[in-house]
Image: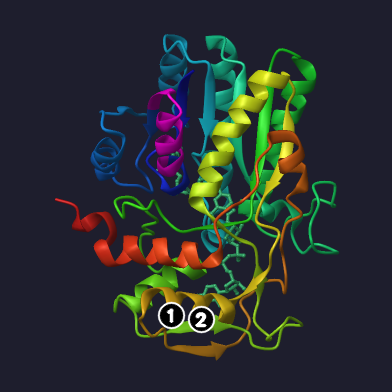
Amino acid sequence: MRILVFGGTGYIGSHTCVELAARGHELVVADNLSNSSPRVLDRLQAIIGAPVAFHNVDLRDRDATRALLAGGGFDAVLHFAALKAVGESCERPLDYFDNNITGTLNLLQAMREGGVSRLVFSSSATVYGDPDRVPVTEDAPLRVTNPYGRTKLVMEQLIADLCAADPGFRAGVLRYFNPVGAHGSGLIGEDPGGVPNNLMPYICQVAVGRRPALSIYGGDWPTVDGTGVRDYIHVLDLARAHADALDTLERTGAGFTVNLGTGTGVSVLQLVQAFERASGRPVPYEIVGRRAGDVAEVYADPSLAEALLGWRAELDVDAMCRDAWRWQSMNPSGYADAG
Ligand code: NAD
Ligand code: WQD
């Protein structure tokens, strides 16, 4: 298939490019580089062994998005392009609505005009908010707690309405839990700008000496050891799920919404300990107050993804930590280290 990967220089998109190329798909990456480096393209070329076609396009630019889709001859679009920082979304909700929701509308319109009828969409466990019970199944109530989450929920609803209106249009909606880890080459990985919001990149930056200590947000949660529990999933398992999602859309002709997680909850302290084992580096931490909006425990029931896509996560927390550390130690300052 010829596939347009929007947001393809980002963390999850870049890893998915490697998987798609390995399965023989033809790739075109589009991104406005608002949260990624063009150096990703050289790294992808080194891994894949061939250059990756790239277009610097902002989804908010309707005409540019339309032009890209019009003559592209694409069989499917993978849509990773979004702003994703929860805290920032509370400060600048309109920017999030514009970038994520307007951007997605532009993409859907451009796909329709360009005759592209298959979409794989990056959604998030954030659509479950604070779930009533774990493991979370896809039919759990959807309730969001911040503007970023709202954009994911609205985008899911827009896509569902479009699928209902146009039986020829098919979408695979993938609700990621907590993506971590990196490609085994150490050439691509997660490179957040500024202070990391998420746990694993923060741990990596402490271990490599960029930050003195991790602040653990709360030691009094009703969990196994008092720290928050999440479902960390290796980005390589996620990448594989995207390729499986495309195959499933092709094979069954039916859309779907599935959780992508391992099904296993891991606490902050358990992740810190696994990381120390994998890296051989100490990760000093202090337990501080809870972070606003956090919840005690969220992990997936991933059985629907297995039933529909034939996919299940294969890589464990030790592999996640080992690969995150390889990336961080080979690139202490992220892509800024790349020549
Ligand atoms: P990322 O920021 O690394 O990648 C997103 C890419 O989209 C970036 O390269 C960015 O430059 C690009 N982009 C953003 N707005 C754009 C626009 N208007 N036009 C063109 N390109 C644009 O993030 P990621 O972690 O790879 O996440 C990919 C997707 O998965 C996002 O939709 C995110 O919301 C979703 N998601 C991420 C996580 C996570 O924890 N990483 C969890 C659940 C869902
Ligand atoms: C994980 C655990 C923290 C940082 C977020 C988004 C969600 C999704 C994934 C996009 C929690 C604790 C963290 C730190 C800590 N993104 N923590 N110290 O909050 O589960 O989900 O990213 O869709 O929408 O909300 O992930 O990595 O921020 O936190 O103690 O410096 O680590 O309290 O228990 P979260 P996270």
Kindly indicate the quadrant of the structure image that contains residue 108.
top right
- Amino acid type of disc 2? Gln
Mark 1 residue type:
Glu
Quick check: can you spot residue 2? yes
The residue where tag 2 is placed is 273
Cβ at disc 1 under 8 Å from ligand 2: no
Q: Quadrant of ligand 2?
A: bottom right
- The structure residue drawn at horizontal position 35% and vertical position 85%, both measured from the top left corner, is 212
Q: Which mark is residue 48?
A: none
Residue pictured at 36% horizontal, 57% vertical: 191
- Image position of 118 (left or right of 71): right
Is disc 2 surrounded by few (<14), some (14 to 19) or many (20+) residues within 10 Å? some
Compared to residue 302, the image places residue 219 above or below, namely: below
Q: Residue at x 74, y 34 (%)?
A: 308
Q: Residue furthest left?
A: 339
Which element carries disc 2, helix, strand or loop?
Answer: helix
Image: 105 above or below 13: above
Q: CA distance from mark 1 to mark 2?
A: 5 Å
Highlighted magenta segment, given as a residue range? 14-28
Q: Is residue 130 left or right of residue 53?
A: right
Residue 41 in the image: above or below residue 326: above
Q: Position of residue 249 (x, y in %)?
A: 66, 24
Residue 13, image x, y percentages:
45, 41
Q: Indicate left or right for 106 with 210 as reference.
A: right
Residue contact between numbered discs 1 and 2, judged by CB atoms under 8 Å: yes
- Please, what is the dominant secondary structure of the magenta stretch? helix
Q: What residue did someone put label 1 on?
A: 276
